[in-house]
Each structure stands twice: as C-alpha cells, then as structure tokens.
Amino acid sequence: MDKSLLKKLGNIDQIAGIRESRLMRGRAEGIQIAEFYNAAGLRFTVVPDRCMDLYDLSYKGVNLSFHSQNGLTSPLAFNAMNGEFAEQWPGGMMVTCGLDNVGGGASNGGNFPVHGRISHVPASNFGTKTYWNGDNYILSAEGEVHMTKMYTRHLSIRRKIETSLDAKVIKIDDVVTNFDDSDEPFMMLYHTNFGYPLLTEKSVVKTTKCTRKGMNDMSNDNEHMMLPVDGRGEELYFQTDLGNAACGVIYNPELELGGYIAWDTKNLPNFLEWKNMKSHDYVLALEPCNTCGLNRDEAVKEGKIAILPAYESISNHLEIGVLDGMTEINSFVKNL
C-alpha cells in the first residue's frame, strides 16, 4: 500500500471509494446503486438492479453520459409489448442489450422486445469491494445476471467492473454462459451513450479503421456533430472488419476532453454508431456487438446469429475511458 499517501488521510474514502444506496421517489423508486469515485476525478454509477449497467459517468465534474427523458426507471416497470421500449429506456453510460434480441422487435418463435430483456434483469450475488494491490487501490463490483425461460433458455452474464485510485478507465469483464442442455442463439450489444457537454456541435468521432455502411438515407457523416435540431431523424452506421481489437472515441476540442470505448473483437466483431442530433434526444452512441445490424428474426433468417453451445462460455473484455487534454487526445486518435 501507499504509506506516504495514507499518512495524509484520515480515511481513504476522502479521495476514493464506493457508496451503495437505494433511490427514493419517482420512476427510480427503490433502485439499488453503487457509486464509484476516485482521486483522478472519475465518478460513475453501477446499477445492480439493471444488469449492473452504468448510468452516470463524469470526470472532474464534467458529465460524459446521456440520460433519456425517462430517466432511470425501475426494472419492475418493464413491459415487453411492442412499442413500449421508448416509454421506458433510461439511457445511461452503458446499457447491455440482448441476450434474446438486439435491434427492432422480433416475433418468430416468441416475443423478443427491442434490444432484448437483459438490461431489465437485476443481478444476483452482487457485491463491491475496495482493497490495496501493491501501491494501487482497487475499486470493484461483481455479480451475475441470469436470463431464463422455462423449457428453452438459461443464459447468464457474470460481470466484473473495476477501476483504481488514479485511473481514468472503467474495465468491464463479462463471462457469458449457456447453462442449458441445448445450443442457444444469443445477441449482445453494449450501448454506450455519450451526451452533453462532451457532445456538442464541435465534437468529433474517430474509430478504428473499418468498413463502414450507412444504414439510412441520413447516414452520410459519422465523424462530425451538430447543434440539436427539432424533430431530426437518427443516423446509423454499421462497422465491420475491425481487426483483433477496436476502439471508438468522441472528443470535444473546446473542452479538451474525450471519452472512448475499446474492446476485444473476438466475440464482438462489429459495432454500430448511433448519431442522434434530435433536440432532447441528443446522443452519440458507440456500440460493440456480436450482431450484424439485424434483429433476431432477420439474423436467424440470414444465418447471421451467434450460437452459444450448451454448457459453454465466452468472455468479453471492454473498457470505457477518459482522455484529458489535446495532447492525450491527439496521441490516442493517431494510434487508432
């Protein structure tokens, strides 16, 4: 441990720690949260009641994440009916999508809602811990999220989220397991959502070299942002051929601040960029995925859906990080 640092402190929680609490009032009534903070100025909220997803993220008091008009909503309000997604989606720094569906709703062989059910499932065996590892102080949360259906499915995510005393990075390690006796189709997408003030008309997006396809008529400039426009439609970009590892970054040269997501592409070979410049829904999302820009029905029909064999597991490794200053940003972008 860092004895010279500890001698300056009454308690380490002066500069770093995890605070667990339960929210009161409104649509978030009763939700359990775990708030991480560290000496670098990184603050973020893990929501064990919602798949251990990340809601808030800020750095030195500057917000990086997007929250929808719904705000944080209880998983008890989940409704899988067609058309209900926009009524309840909270946004947040990272929303896990899947494991039954990603993209638009599907109905072949069951009811598969927009972006699936997993983000509405509370974690079991959730716990947090802080400890010294040499001279580094670690802040960590772990838990399991099980997605089940009688006669057909038992998929789970065992998730670990970690940062440290002086880090500007959140590490996310997921182990996805099929506990059933049948091979199971599964779809997975990490919906990471950046918002104002990191996102403004001055902000720029850069990604790993890839093959990029615009998915609608408006999708013709994935790099440059704009001021919010009342009633404007969304832009979508599907990106493939990423190599062994991939990264997407958004930075604001006026703030000299950037945010990024990086990941191992072994089981997440593609990603989507969602650029929504609409007023009040002003968000830039970078979304690593194992899907092909299709919902479950379309992916099954085209033979483009991932299969997890019975009793087997795969691992996903991601990090969400902050870039502070144009020197750091330019160096990072140069190496994409």
Image (tube, grey):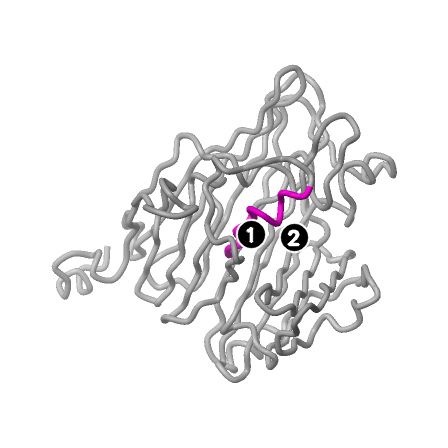
Label 1, on which residue? 318
- Taking the magenta stretch, the answer to whether it contains residue 104 is no
User: Would you place residue 30 above or below residue 89 in this image?
Assistant: above
- The image's mark for residue 288 is 2
Q: What residue type is disc 2 on?
A: Pro
Give x and y (percent) for residue 294. 78, 45
Q: Is 324 or 205 nearer to us in this picture? A: 205
Q: Is 170 or 285 nearer to us in this picture? A: 285
Is 333 positioned to the left or the right of 134 in the image? right
Residue at (47, 51) in percent of width and height: 54
- Taking the magenta stretch, the answer to whether it contains residue 84 is yes
User: Would you place residue 280 above or below residue 147 in this image?
Assistant: below
Quadrant assignment, res 22 = top left
In the picture, the quarter occupied by the N terminus is bottom left
Residue at (55, 78) in percent of width and height: 252
Q: Mark 1 packing: few (<14 Cα in 10 Å), some, or many (20+)?
A: many
Q: Are marks 2 and 1 in contact (CB under 8 Å)?
A: yes
Q: Mark 2 packing: few (<14 Cα in 10 Å), some, or many (20+)?
A: many
Q: What residue type is disc 1 on?
A: Leu
Residue depth check, mark 2 versus mark 1: number of the one nearer the observer: 2
Tell me where the magenta segment starts and ends, as one range: 83-95
First in sequence: mark 2 vs mark 1: 2
Residue at (62, 49) in percent of width and height: 86
Dot 1 falls on a residue whose secondary structure is strand
In the picture, the quarter occupied by the C terminus is bottom right
How far apart marks 2 and 1 lie (CA) works out to 9 Å
Give x and y (percent) for residue 105. 72, 40
Dot 2 falls on a residue whose secondary structure is strand
Residue at (50, 33) in percent of width and height: 145
Quadrant assignment, res 242 = bottom right
Is 104 positioned to the left or the right of 37 in the image? right
